[in-house]
């Protein structure tokens, strides 16, 4: 059996890249929406 | 509850007798699916004979989606659903009625398809003792699950596309179990099939139970 | 000024998660030894097993929140069910991808119709259906109720699928951690637990953010409705004073 580092790095790379993209898109969307909502309705700050 | 169920089932079956949508459109569609499989898999009898059980149930499930859509489309037109909600009929009774009517139509369809696989795929229906109860249990399960998701999607504008997406994964266990039972009934020793029949009965019981308890909620939400 | 969905709490949580991922990479790819049976390939388990666990946990939260929504009818439970299902779907996709990449060198194929794989694939499709219901163009309360019922039905469906497919085929190895005698090396086990902790942290962190994004989406929808009503009102009252020409472009 080969040691399979290609598969391992692909696996980590794909999963991490997907997570980064999703987090980035979600926070971007959050920023865009937050600007449209008056501050008193965003109580978490 | 039983009287309400008989009323709803009677109404649906009368509707079918007069409009003949299931027999004139759904049944030919089911046979068409069988023929399409034959095109896709070569008319070589070997492959078709080995895959008969699976192809049969895939054809049944596809037609069941159409039948469910039809069964609940008639409830949406002209606000019949609101009438049903206001009619004071027991929701569990309505559910049982819809399931019974749907199951009756599906059983006719399955008999036709059975004839189809005997003629087109050269299937040997020796193990009737297993095949018939399998059909009954699987049909009840599909009709119950179909009615649950049918009423959910009935009022939506995208009902044609959302129903298969929601329903087909849910009835996937029926496909697995019924196919295994049919394979045992058609070729293998019949004894292999009984536990799959058991699973089908459990599935049907689970979804009938779910429907009886949650149909009032579904009728309210849809 | 803070024009995002972040708060001090989520920033702290996010930083810890980030450090956790760095540690997971360090332990998973460098420090932990190769397994006796699986060789280097065991390193993929540090992604595969934690994402699977956390994804199943996320769907449990969705089912519970759906039940709670049907009982209480509050926006909070609706948003929790929705956000949790979204993150669960992402993590389950990661489980499937890492499992395929592990299966190819181990079993020789990316996919096999084993019981647990089939159940997982079906669950993934079911969740896609649930998320499709979430995007239906409906009245918000109606959509929430519909989604809650579909979410509630996820549970019996998954159980039935699990039993059907277990009888059908079984090839996937059983759980290794739950056994009484720990069969795996100490550092391997530590890395696995670290992975679980890191992905659980990620879930909580993303959950807070998704909840806030979905909450903001609802508020923007409300605002849009309010402005639209105000505009119609203005138009209606303005129409009496200065009637607009019926044709021609408005400049």
Image (cartoon, coloured by chain):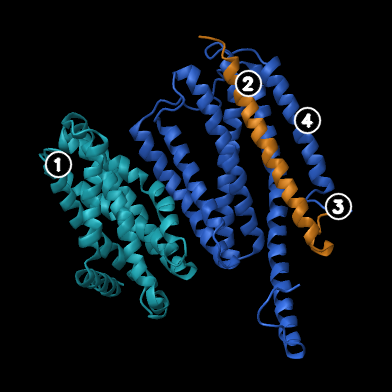
Q: Which residue is mark 2?
A: A9
Query: Do residues under tags 2 and 3 come within 8 Å of each other at their CB atoms?
Result: no
Q: Chain of mark 1?
A: B
Q: Chain of mark 3?
A: C
In the picture, measured across the screen, residue B95 lies left or right of residue C183, that is left
- Residue A22 position (above or below residue B29): above
Dots 2 and 4 on the same chain: no
Give the number of the disc on residue C19: 4
Q: Is residue B195 visible?
A: no
Give the number of the disc on residue B68: none
Most foreground residue, C169 or B39: B39
User: Where does residue B37 sit, x and y in percent of width and height?
Assistant: 25, 40
Report the Cα–Cα distance between label 4 and label 1: 64 Å
Instruction: Point out the frontmost of discs 1 and 3.
Output: 1
Q: Chain of mark 4?
A: C
Helix, strand, or loop for circle 3? loop
Q: Which residue is mark 1?
A: B120
**Which badge, 3 or 4, comes first in the chain's sequence?**
3
Dots 1 and 3 on the same chain: no
Q: Which residue is mark 3?
A: C2
Report the Cα–Cα distance between label 2 and label 3: 37 Å
**Residue drawn 16% across the image and 52% down it:** B111
Dots 4 and 1 on the same chain: no
Query: Do residues under tags 2 and 1 come within 8 Å of each other at their CB atoms?
Result: no
Report the Cα–Cα distance between label 1 and label 3: 69 Å
């Amino acid at each position: 059996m080969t040691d399979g580092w290609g598969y391992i790095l692909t696996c980590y790379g794909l999963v991490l890249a997907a997570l980064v993209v999703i987090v980035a898109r979600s926070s971007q969307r959050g920023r865009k929406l937050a600007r449209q909502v008056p501050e008193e309705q965003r109580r978490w700050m | 509850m039983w009287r309400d169920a008989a009323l709803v089932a009677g109404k649906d079956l009368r509707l079918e007798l007069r409009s003949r949508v299931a027999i004139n459109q759904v049944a030919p569609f089911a046979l068409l699916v069988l023929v399409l499989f034959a095109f896709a898999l070569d008319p070589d009898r070997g492959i078709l004979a080995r895959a008969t059980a699976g192809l049969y149930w895939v054809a049944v499930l596809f037609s069941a989606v159409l039948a469910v859509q039809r069964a609940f489309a008639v409830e949406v037109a002209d606000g019949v659903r609101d009438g049903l909600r206001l009619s004071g009929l027991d929701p569990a009774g309505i559910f049982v009625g819809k399931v019974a009517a749907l199951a009756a139509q599906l059983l006719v369809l399955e008999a036709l398809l059975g004839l189809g696989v005997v003629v087109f795929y050269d299937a040997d229906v020796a193990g009737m003792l297993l095949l018939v109860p399998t059909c009954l249990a699987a049909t009840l399960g599909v009709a119950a699950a179909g009615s649950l998701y049918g009423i959910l999607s009935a009022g939506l504008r995208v009902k044609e596309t959302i129903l298969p997406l929601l329903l087909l994964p849910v009835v996937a266990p029926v496909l697995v179990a019924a196919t295994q039972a049919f394979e045992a009934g058609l070729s293998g020793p019949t004894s292999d099939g009984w536990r799959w029949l058991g699973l089908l009965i459990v599935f049907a019981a689970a979804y009938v139970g779910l429907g009886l308890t949650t149909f009032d909620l579904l009728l309210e939400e849809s | 000024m803070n024009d995002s969905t972040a708060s001090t709490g989520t920033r702290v949580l996010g930083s810890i998660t980030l450090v956790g991922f760095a540690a997971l990479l360090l332990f998973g790819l460098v420090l932990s030894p190769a397994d006796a049976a699986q060789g280097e390939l065991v390193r993929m388990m540090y992604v595969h097993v934690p994402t699977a666990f956390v994804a199943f946990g996320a769907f449990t939260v969705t089912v519970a929140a759906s039940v709670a929504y049907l009982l209480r009818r509050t926006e909070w439970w609706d948003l929790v069910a929705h956000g949790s299902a979204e993150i669960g779907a992402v993590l389950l996709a990661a489980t499937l991808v890492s499992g395929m990449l592990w299966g190819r060198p181990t079993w020789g194929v990316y996919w096999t119709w084993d019981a647990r794989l089939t159940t997982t694939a079906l669950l993934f499709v079911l969740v896609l259906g649930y998320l499709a219901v979430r995007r239906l163009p409906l009245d918000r309360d109606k959509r929430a109720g519909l989604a809650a019922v579909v979410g509630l039905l996820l549970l019996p469906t998954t159980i039935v699928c699990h039993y059907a497919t277990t009888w059908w085929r079984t090839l996937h190895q059983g759980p290794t951690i739950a056994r009484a005698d720990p069969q795996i090396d100490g550092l391997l086990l530590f890395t696995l637990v670290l992975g679980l902790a890191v992905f659980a942290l990620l879930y909580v962190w993303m959950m807070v953010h998704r909840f806030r994004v979905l909450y903001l989406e609802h508020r923007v929808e409300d605002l849009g409705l309010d402005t639209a009503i105000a505009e119609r009102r203005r138009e209606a009252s303005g129409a009496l004073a200065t009637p607009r020409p019926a044709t021609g472009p408005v400049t």
